[in-house]
Amino acid sequence: MASLIELRQVFFQECEEQLEDLTDGLTALEGSEDFSNLDPEIINRMFRAVHSVKGGAASFSLDAITQFAHAYESILDELRSGKLTLNQKIINTFFTSADYLTDLVSLGAENVEPIAAELESKIKDLSALSGSMKFGAGVSEEDDCIAAFTPLALSGEMQFPPVEDVNGSVFEIYFKPTLDLYANGHEPVQIFRELSTLGVLEVQCKFDRDFKWDQAEPAIEWHLALSTNQSESEILEIFEFSEPYAKIEISSKVADITVSAPIESVSKHPASTPTMEKPNAAPDPAGEVHSAEPSAIRSAISAAPKATVRVDLDLVDELINLVGELVITQSVMTQSITEQDGIGGRQLSTTLEDFKSLTRTIQEGVMAIRAQSVKPLFQRMARIVRETAQIAGKEVRFATEGEDTEVDRTVIERLVDPLTHILRNAVDHGLEDAALRSQAGKDRIGTVTLSAAHRSGRVVIEVIDDGGGVQREKVLSSAIEKGLVPQAAQLSDSDIDRLLFLPGFSTAASVTNLSGRGVGMDVVNSEIRRLGGRVAIISHPGSGTTISISLPLTLAVLDGMVVDVADETMVVPISAIVETIRPDTSQIHQIGPAARMIAVREKMVPIIELGAVFGCAPIKNHTNDGILVIVEDDKGEHFALAVDKIRDQRQVVIKSLESNYGHVPFVAAATILGDGQIALIVDLDEITHQVSVDQSRSIQSIEAIA
Amino acid sequence: MKIEDDSSNSEKFELITFSIGSQDFCMDIILVREIRGWTNVTMLPHAPKDVLGVMNLRGAVVPIVDLSARLGLGVCESKERDVIIITLIEKKIVGFLVTAVSDIIELSQTDIQPMPQMGGKKENQFVKGIYISDNKTLRVLDIASLAASMTTAQESV
């Protein structure tokens, strides 16, 4: 039953999308200003999402999901029909229920039965909202579930209150299919269903009862009347693919429409399952006419789902690898052709340029496939904020910006933990209590904003709260108390803010469920750095804190500085580089037999001989011919790497050394340069860590001198 | 350890023969992916002496082992004329530098004489049998254990 398993997988994948829709709708509802005058489209969309989950779950006998989705759906139905008026409490229950539904789905995916008591109580929570209390906990309306599976049932999910005020034009559409329409897998019902999303659609079917039995062409034609405010091109778009296989005539007349009494035997009763006859099926004497109301998707064009293809991630990764090799081969080729210049002439070099730009386009395109919008991540974070706010007993408004920003999949996955920490901190520490807030003249409800944006080739994710900002005295005294900074340290405001990232640091007076154990921000910092990113904190006392994460777009490519060290070529990640200097001998101070320091902007920075680290050259008696690359480690300490020469600054494709060999000390990965040679990418954190352990004693003595 | 699995029967299997200095060796051909000439390698810091470095094999980063040094026969001198046997061992691609590749032979397990006990020297550690043909002595190398020990040697650094 492999196919059933596959179907199940597809169901769970689709569930994710549906749940995303549901959460979207909830967020939209929460944001709407007037709860008594809601956009019906939003509720319809939510209803449909829950309904699809329920329908799918029922067919896979996932009873818990079916039951819960049913309860949810019933409440949404009441909301839709106006029996229930929305308030903040209901929205909160909706949110927690959506979260629970997500849990149920993930439990279902792992074939785990949920705790019955919890399910029961969650269903009760939902049904408690109901105005009529007409449904119980179980699946009482079995038939409703079944109706959803009747393939031709248009009514199943379209029981909308009639919307009579559709202004716009009426299009009369004549549709006569040819045999090819069916041969090419088109289904008129699908087309009509699509049409009905544009406006009020009346369908009249004419069946030629005198057709000959050996007649090859379908003996059926439809007359449709569509009242919509959409343009004709929208309609044509729907017919786009069926157009070659059918006779289609569209004529429009502008009118102010009320749903007029339909012509002839119109079944206007949405509850009765309409039968749309296929031409070769048993003929029904009377042409059936069906009327459907507009549904949600079209009206919110911005939210219209884009057509997507599901692709195995391994396939994409393989493609990325191959493109990486293509880029390398291309640069090897360019280099070898330029070396024997004059042979190819101008034409060769133009072709080469074209080839170069093509490969670059392909590379960008493939990278974009791997990219994903941060929306699912943000929705997950919304849940964390809600839960944290509940535990902390604070009212929090959660806003997101730039949800459509696309980032590499792996980056998104690895952002979950750091962002969770940051958001919990923002709610628990960042925002003040409601009482304090009103004292300070702020809105009682705190706001936490999560935003994402592309900025100069990197992704910047920011968590902004409008809380009290970092309490610097408290941070400083706490850090001194814990022995993290010396007693008499003179620190600037931003230095103090950065103390939050020190391991073991916490200001929370008591260890709570949420935070205060002193692990958190330092973990955030190291995790982000591992992704090649940087964390910054900007705080304004009284008005809030912004934590900003800057990340590379992808993990497969790295911006690096190509340097020469003792006849070897190495790559230093640009993200860590602060500056490069050509030092004057007078700036360099010899400390002890081996250690050397340089004064950079009134700070003493230890010099690391990169060649010595890799054991490939004896420490030379350095004159001022070397170049120092100043880098910053994850603790904000600066180090100067002595290199022989800076060759280039370029994007390099990261190649793992571990896959064929193993870990190499002080090396993060390898890459292939334009000449086909392998260059090692230095692992700065490992090097600087090693050095700070080795030199901690001598650094202290320097500080005394300086 | 394919060879040992087949030890019960006399099924033939193919081995590739090559020389290191003046000695002749052979190994199971199943493990061999390709044979190629010497190209410059990038050295790996803090690697054992017999790991010459890594090479770019069509986009893959492949470590190259000096088989002569690995077997304790001294560091290989004239690299430019030597060849590299690229092997795939347990999903890892490893290249071995040898002096020359000569032939492919077909043997059955019974043709191979077990290695006489001669003490735990490095060379004998990885030689699991001897085949004598005409006037040649072929040492059958257990290349999988050679490759496995590469990582352990490297981890102990």
Image (cartoon, coloured by chain):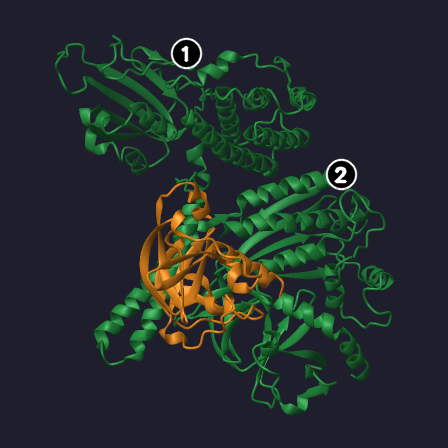
Chain colours: A green, B orange
Q: Residue at x 47, y 22 (%)?
A: A160
Task: Say if A638 sits above or below A142 in the image.
Answer: below
Task: Say if B1 sits above or below A8 in the image.
Answer: below
Q: Residue at x 27, y 13 (%)?
A: A287
Q: On the same chain: label 1 and label 2?
A: yes
Task: Say if A654 sits above or below A348 in the image.
Answer: above
Quarter of the figure with the C terminus of chain A: bottom right
Q: Name which residue type carries label 1.
A: Ser
Residue A137: percent from the left, percent from the top?
Answer: 63, 16
Q: Is residue A477 visible?
A: yes
Bin the neighbour count of mark 2 within 10 Å (Cα to Cα): few under 14, some 14-19, many 20 and up: few
Instruction: Name which quarter of the figure residue A163 lies in.
Output: top left
Q: Residue at x 64, y 14 (%)?
A: A133
A147 left or right, relative to A536: left
Q: Which residue is mark 2?
A: A391
Between residue A407 and residue A650, name the one nearer to us.
Answer: A650
Task: Say if A661 sits above or below A679 in the image.
Answer: above
A181 left or right, relative to A358: left
Bin the neighbour count of mark 1 within 10 Å (Cα to Cα): few under 14, some 14-19, many 20 and up: few
Between residue B80 and residue A670, name the one nearer to us.
Answer: B80
Between residue A145 and residue A636, name the one nearer to us.
Answer: A636
Q: Chain of mark 1?
A: A
Instruction: Name which quarter of the figure residue A217 lies in.
Output: top left
Q: Is residue A553 visible?
A: no
Q: Chain of mark 2?
A: A
Residue A413: percent from the left, percent from the top?
Answer: 56, 48
Q: Earlier in the sequence, mark 1 or mark 2?
A: 1
Q: Name which residue type carries label 2.
A: Ile
Q: Which residue is mark 1?
A: A272
Q: Residue at x 31, y 77 (%)?
A: A338
Residue A57: percent from the left, percent from the top?
Answer: 51, 23
Residue B42: percent from the left, percent from the top?
Answer: 47, 71
